[in-house]
Image: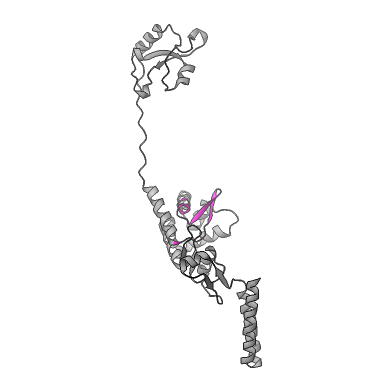
C-alpha cells in the first residue's frame, strides 16, 4: 500500500509539472502516455530493500525507475530467477544466497545444456518451456519427441540434468529449476562429473568351496551316528542331514574330518557362519 501511494504521489507531481510546462493540446497526450506507463509501472516494485543485497552489493536500496525492455529469453530467465521487475542484472541465488548476474548465470546454464543434454539451444528452449508449462512433470518420452533421440538417451540426459541443477526430480518425471548462480552450476557439474568418473569399488572375493567327497561325508555321518550334533534329531525323525564346518569355511575353516560335524538343515541354516560349538 505504501508503494502504491508513493507511485501515485510521483505520478501526480509529474502530471502537475507537465500541465504547467506543456501547452494544453499536447499535455493531454502526454498525460495519457503517463497513465499507460503508470499502469505498467504499478505491476512491479519501485524499490527493493534487502540486507543481503546491502552486504554483497554495498548498498541497501535498489531503485527501479520505469521498466527495461528485454527479449523474451531474458525475461523468462529473470522470471525463473524470481525477479518480478527490472532489478538491474543481479539476483539472489536461491541455493547459496550469492548475488549473481543474470547474464552470467544464463551463460553457465547454456554451457551445462551443451555438456549434459547435448541439445541445441532451440531444442532446450522447447524442453524448458514444456517443463514450466506442462501440468505434469516432463518425462523421457517428452525429450525423445522434442530432440528426436532414443528413449534410453533421453532418460539418461534427464537424469544427468537433474544432477547439475538444470531440472529437479518431480515424482516420476522432472520439472524446471529456478535460475542459480554460476558458482552453484559449476560445483554441481564438478561433483557430478567426479561421481561419474569414480572407479567402482571391487567386489569382495569369496572363497570357492569344493564339494565334500562322498567317502569323507559318510565317515563323518557314521562317526556322529547319523544324528544332528546340535538338536539330536536323526533322519528317521524327519531331519535332513547336512555336514557343517565347526570353524566356518568363510573364516578359514578347513574341510577336514575333525572340522566337520553332522547337522540338520534347520540347525545348519540357522547357524550360518557363526562360531557355535555343538552341545
Colouring used for the render: one colour
Q: Is residue 171 magenta?
A: yes
Percent from the top left, x then y, of residue 195? 39, 48
Compare residues 65 and 31 and report the one nearer the observer.
Answer: 65
Q: Residue reaching furthest bottom?
A: 23
Q: Is residue 130 left or right of residue 275?
A: right
Q: Is residue 143 left or right of residue 209?
A: right
Q: Is residue 66 magenta?
A: no
Which quarter shows the C terminus? top left
Compare residues 67 and 18 and report the one nearer the observer.
Answer: 18
**How many marks are shown on the rendered structure?**
0
Percent from the top left, x then y, of residue 276? 43, 18
Compare residues 147 and 32 and report the one nearer the observer.
Answer: 32
Compare residues 162 and 151 and report the one nearer the observer.
Answer: 162
Q: Is residue 129 above or below residue 193?
A: below
Q: Is residue 23 left or right of residue 226?
A: right
Task: Give the residues in magenta.
Answer: 159-181
Percent from the top left, x then y, of residue 264? 47, 14
Which quarter shows the N terminus? bottom right
Percent from the top left, x then y, of residue 93? 49, 61
Amino acid at each position: 500500500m505504501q508503494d502504491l501511494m508513493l507511485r501515485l504521489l510521483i505520478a501526480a507531481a509529474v502530471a502537475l509539472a507537465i500541465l504547467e510546462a506543456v501547452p494544453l493540446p499536447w499535455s493531454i497526450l502526454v498525460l495519457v502516455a503517463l497513465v499507460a506507463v503508470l499502469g505498467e509501472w504499478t505491476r512491479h516494485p519501485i524499490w527493493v530493500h534487502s540486507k543481503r543485497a546491502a552486504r554483497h552489493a554495498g548498498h541497501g536500496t535498489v531503485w527501479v525507475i520505469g521498466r527495461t525492455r528485454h527479449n523474451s529469453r531474458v525475461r523468462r530467465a529473470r522470471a525463473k530467477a524470481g525477479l518480478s521487475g527490472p532489478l538491474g542484472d543481479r539476483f539472489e541465488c536461491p541455493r547459496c544466497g550469492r548475488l549473481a548476474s543474470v547474464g552470467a548465470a544464463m551463460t553457465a546454464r547454456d554451457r551445462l545444456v551443451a555438456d549434459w543434454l547435448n541439445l541445441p539451444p532451440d531444442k532446450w528452449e522447447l524442453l524448458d518451456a514444456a517443463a514450466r508449462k506442462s501440468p505434469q512433470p516432463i518425462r523421457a518420452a517428452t525429450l525423445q519427441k522434442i530432440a528426436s533421440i532414443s528413449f534410453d538417451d533421453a532418460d539418461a540426459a534427464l537424469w544427468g540434468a537433474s544432477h547439475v541443477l538444470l531440472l529437479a526430480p518431480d515424482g516420476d518425471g522432472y520439472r524446471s529449476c529456478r535460475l542459480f548462480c554460476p558458482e552453484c552450476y559449476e560445483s554441481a557439474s564438478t561433483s557430478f562429473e567426479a561421481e561419474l568418473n569414480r572407479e567402482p569399488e571391487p567386489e569382495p572375493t569369496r572363497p570357492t568351496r569344493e564339494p565334500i567327497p562322498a567317502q569323507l561325508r559318510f565317515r563323518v555321518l557314521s562317526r556322529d551316528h547319523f544324528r544332528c550334533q546340535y538338536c539330536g534329531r536323526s533322519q528317521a525323525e524327519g531331519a535332513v542331514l547336512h555336514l557343517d564346518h565347526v570353524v566356518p569355511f568363510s573364516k578359514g575353516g578347513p574341510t577336514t574330518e575333525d572340522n566337520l560335524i553332522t547337522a540338520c538343515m534347520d540347525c545348519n541354516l540357522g547357524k550360518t557362519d557363526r562360531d557355535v560349538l555343538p552341545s
